[in-house]
Image (spheres, helix red, strand yellow):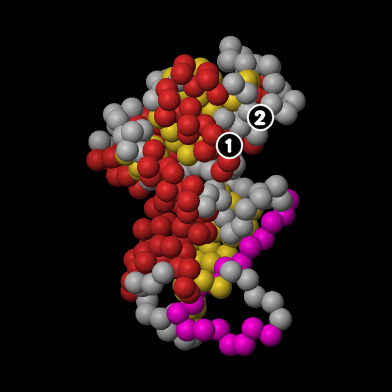
Amino acid sequence: MRIAISGSSGRMGKMLIKAVNEHPDLTLTVALDSPQSPLMGQDAGALLGIETGVQISHDPSLLKNADCLIDFTRPEATLNYLEHCLKYQTKMVIGTTGLTSEQRQTLEKASHQLAIVFSPNMSIGVNSTFLLLEKAAQLLNDEYDIEIFEAHHKHKVDAPSGTALEMGKVVAQARGVDLNEVADWARHGHTGPREKGHIGFSVVRGGDIVGDHRVMFCGPGEIIEIAHRSNSRDAYASGSLLAACFLKSQSSGLFNMLDVIKAHTSKH
């Protein structure tokens, strides 16, 4: 399977290039980045000490040479790549966060013609955590207050993280409520007592934290905490490649990582 990677000189891009290079069934054929990248024109593996034979480019028409694009960039770049992927029928694995509801609708519309895996987090562990959260929210009534904490590196530009938002959606849906109606995105000053049934969010940005997510169910006399901590981006990369392989047999549709995981486990 021929793989294209966008954001090739970024943290996630480099991790994906390394992972594709080591995968027996995948071949890197396209490496894209913004025109401002200092690595433009260099081999995609230059910073990794490997030679891929693929030069970093800003020309999205090169997507015609790939079966699937793995994209961890910004919403505007993702939507731009989507147009070219539609043109060339290049499938997409999208890990970009911060998309608006309108941009998500654009993905949904495109998926009628194109196979797409879209997930705020490609980690198999994180997506398994979503299932645990759903069960916990169903078992624990609204006497248990829910607080969601997340921490990431200082370069992350959106908050709360896509994973934290997805965690909020999972527990809200399990309780039969709309997250937007019960979310407390920030607290400052005299906020008054906590409203029953609300879901609070806390955000930390600093250093080189890869990803730390915790959901606390705070009840009378006890706290249940479900947490996931990422020590490296390896889990995101391996999940992304699993998603790309999953798309090989799909012609269209919008899928998430739970679809990928279920399909993978059913084969083993």
Residue type at mark 2: give it. Answer: Ser
Residue drawn at 64 percent across, 36 percent down: 11
Q: Is residue 47 above or below residue 161?
A: above
Report the front residue among 84 and 227: 84
Q: Is residue 5 above or below residue 121?
A: above
Q: Secondary structure at mark 2?
A: loop
Residue drawn at 36 percent across, 33 percent down: 114
Q: Bounds of the magenta span?
A: 190-207
Residue receiving disc 1: 77
* Residue 111, quarter of picture: top left
Q: CA distance from mark 1 to mark 2?
A: 9 Å
Residue type at mark 1: give it. Answer: Ala
Mark 1 crowdedness (10 Å alpha carbons): few <14, some 14-19, many ≥20 = some
Image coords of residue 149 (percent x, y): 57, 65
Image coords of residue 246 (percent x, y): 34, 33
CB under 8 Å between callouts 1 and 2? yes
Mark 2 crowdedness (10 Å alpha carbons): few <14, some 14-19, many ≥20 = some
- Numbered label attached to residue 34: 2
Badge count: 2
Residue drawn at 48 percent across, 34 percent down: 82
Tell me the quadrant of the picture where the N terminus can be found. Answer: top left
Q: Say if the magenta span includes residue 196.
A: yes
